Amino acid sequence: MTALLGALSDAWAEIRVHKLRVLLSLIGIAVSVAALTGVVAISEYQRQFQAEQSDRWGGRVATVAVGVASDDGSPVDFDAFDERFSRVSERFGFSHTARIVQGMVVPVQLPEGVADVGARLIDPAYSQIHREKLLDGRWLQDSDVEALAPAVVVTEALWDRIGRVPLSQHPTLTLTGAAGGIYQVVGVVPRQGFGDEELRLDILYDAYRERVDALPQEAWPQYEVWLGQDQVDEIAPVLAMDLRAGLPEGQTVSVSRTDWAAQPGAMDAQATFEMVTGGIAAVILGLGALSLINIQLVAMRQRVREIGVRRAFGATSGRVFFSVFLESLVATTVAGLIGIAVVVAVLRSDWVVTSLFYGIQDIPPFPMRAAFVGLAASIIVGAVAGLIPALVALRVKVIDAIRF
């Protein structure tokens, strides 16, 4: 222990004496470690961003979609299937189920006249299953069925068309046609990207059915259930059997997963991204390590007299080896910690992450895996960069001090 502490003391003293040389040689290491740490951390954020984007389209892991259709194209009694689906859901104890009808068009009175606007009929649980993020206001609730002016959630583009009236002033939309009446805007869905000008409103499924006796002929409801990933493989087949039992002849029920985890190759794409970005960072770190080794070898040629004198005064081979070895190891570790600290400080700023990943909802904390990878890389680089000069130092003899 005394020898180790002595070697550490010698290494730290050499770092202090050669501050400029050490600083210049370690800037590249700090930048390389910061790049590697940043790549690993951004990969984690990318994973979260991709998961959220996939959740918005296909539902969270694990979402099961249920559809019913007739073989000959005849109409399906969706009210009867609603009751069947409700009974089965209660028996299984599902906590998150939603009905979705997409692709509808309703006439809406806008300031410039009546226009056809896309519409969806959904249940409140849809927002949780699909990670719906609102720009302003709130999502649809079960209690909205009792409102005299049914609640609707509109897209930001449609909100712009009605004058972007603050939701605190209770803006309304007037619909004509079968579901005609006044609807209150309670929430706004933000644009999903640059150039998104979709005009759409979301209406509570039951609120729409209060005004309309039957769904339009082109409207085909889909039913979604959010299950645990460890339960879906067992529950999905049984759910399909229960829903098919007793169906009218000629009708079929389809049950399938729609979340990203069920898609083939979903994890492979993420692994490929991590491999490519990690490889780039490793190349950068390797170049920094080669530069450090070169500088250390040049510096070692200039320290021949110093090491020879130390050997003349009784320094052992082990003491000389570890003092040179630990000099690089300590310096690169400190440089690595500085690089990691810079990356942590930058990526802990929410605005940095949201600007890199537009629309991310649940910003994860800084991944400790990235910090450990960066620290391990700096230690390995320090060990490799210190080993070769330390072996060179072992070959220095006392007579070399006289020659230099």
Image: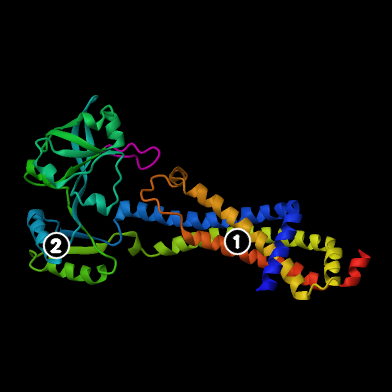
CB contact under 8 Å: marks 2 and 1: no
Question: In the picture shown, does residue 19 fall above or below 138?
Answer: below
Q: Residue 191 colored magenta?
A: yes
Left or right, residue 306 beside residue 62: right
Identify the secondary structure beneath mark 1.
Answer: helix
In the picture of the structure, the residue carrying the numbered disc 1 is 282
Residue 89: mark in rendering: 2
Left or right, residue 179 beside residue 286: left
| Coordinates of residue 289 in the picture (x, y in percent) | 68, 61
| Coordinates of residue 28 in the picture (x, y in percent) | 67, 54
Q: Residues within 10 Å of mark 1 (few under 14, many from 20)?
A: some
Q: Is residue 12 visible?
A: yes
Q: What amino acid type is highlighted by mark number 2?
A: Ser
Q: What amino acid type is highlighted by mark number 1?
A: Ala
Identify the secondary structure beneath mark 2.
Answer: helix
Q: Residues within 10 Å of mark 2 (few under 14, many from 20)?
A: some
The image quadrant of residue 333 is: bottom right
Query: What type of secondary structure mainly makes up the magenta span?
Result: loop
Q: Earlier in the sequence, mark 2 or mark 1?
A: 2
For the N terminus, give its image quadrant.
bottom right
For the record, the magenta segment spans 188-199
Q: Residue at x 54, y 51 (%)?
A: 343
Q: Residue at x 27, y 32 (%)?
A: 159
